[in-house]
Amino acid sequence: MAYTDLFFDLDHTIWDFELNSKETLWDLHLKYELEAKGINDFDVFYSQYSVHNHRLWDRYTKGFIKQEELRWKRIYLSLLDYKIADEALAKEMSHDYLDILPNKKNLFPYTIEILEYLKGKEYKMHLITNGFESVQFKKIKNSNLADYFIEVITSEASNSLKPQKEIFEYALKSANAKVENSIMIGDNESADIQGAINAGMDSVFVNHLQVKPTVPATYTITHLKELENLL
């Protein structure tokens, strides 16, 4: 297949969300003196936060909750695990979290190298993300990724979320790309891979965690360098 347009996911695919999020929460743990509030083991606290965050993101992408509820409730529920029922604190921490997070710059290994490689081959590269628009653009800028991508398609701009086909149709139109010459590259099977299938687009499952695939991607890789063998 002669691909011309590559559509990347951002978080968990090239921008290391878990590492950046953990560093951000550690900053908040220190700032708000959470140890004095009974949160002694930060790793346990972060693990519990990740569970709440994942569950709430799933509800958000399925349309059960709004963006604002997701933002503060993931922290509120994490605090509640320690019997800290403080909504005001959760909302203040949530505000700071979204201020600090986009300044983190950790990328997955070989991200810049593979983007340079693909740019050298004259692919047109774009991003499709469910993340909050203002936050995502800051991440892209601060991580020195902006020069690699022509279009950045967000759920807010398209008024739809992966895996809905509408966000992919919006992305193709924005990029002036044909579906048969485009490929989606992402780590999330239910959002990126199923979304590509819904839109009739080929896909690459970036299986960083080396889990057993459950959605049939066109290609599967475990390291970004492997894209050199496909594209």
Image (cartoon, grey):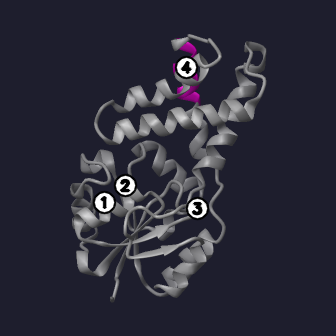
Upstream in the sequence, badge 1 or badge 4?
Answer: 4
Residue 65: image location, x then y, percent: 33, 30
Tell me the distance, in whole angstroms, between the alpha carbons under discs 3 and 4. Answer: 31 Å
Q: Residues within 10 Å of mark 1 (few under 14, many from 20)?
A: many
Question: At label 4, which amino acid type do we have?
Answer: Ala
Q: Nearer the viewer, mark 3 or mark 2?
A: 2
Numbered range of the magenta stretch:
88-96
Upstream in the sequence, badge 3 or badge 4?
Answer: 4
Q: Is residue 90 left or right of residue 30?
A: left
* Quarter of the figure with residue 156: top left
| CB under 8 Å between discs 1 and 2 | yes
Residue 4: image location, x then y, percent: 34, 82
| Label number found at residue 168 | none
Tell me the distance, in whole angstroms, between the alpha carbons under discs 1 and 2. Answer: 5 Å
Point 58% across, 50% down: residue:
17
Residue corresponding to mark 2: 191
Residue corresponding to mark 3: 144
Residue 195: image location, x then y, percent: 30, 60
Question: At label 2, which amino acid type do we have?
Answer: Ala
Vertical order, 88 against 126 (above or below):
above
Helix, strand or loop for disc 4: helix
Please state the total of marks drawn on the protein image: 4
Q: Residues within 10 Å of mark 3 (few under 14, many from 20)?
A: few
- The answer to whether residue 98 shows anywhere in this view is no
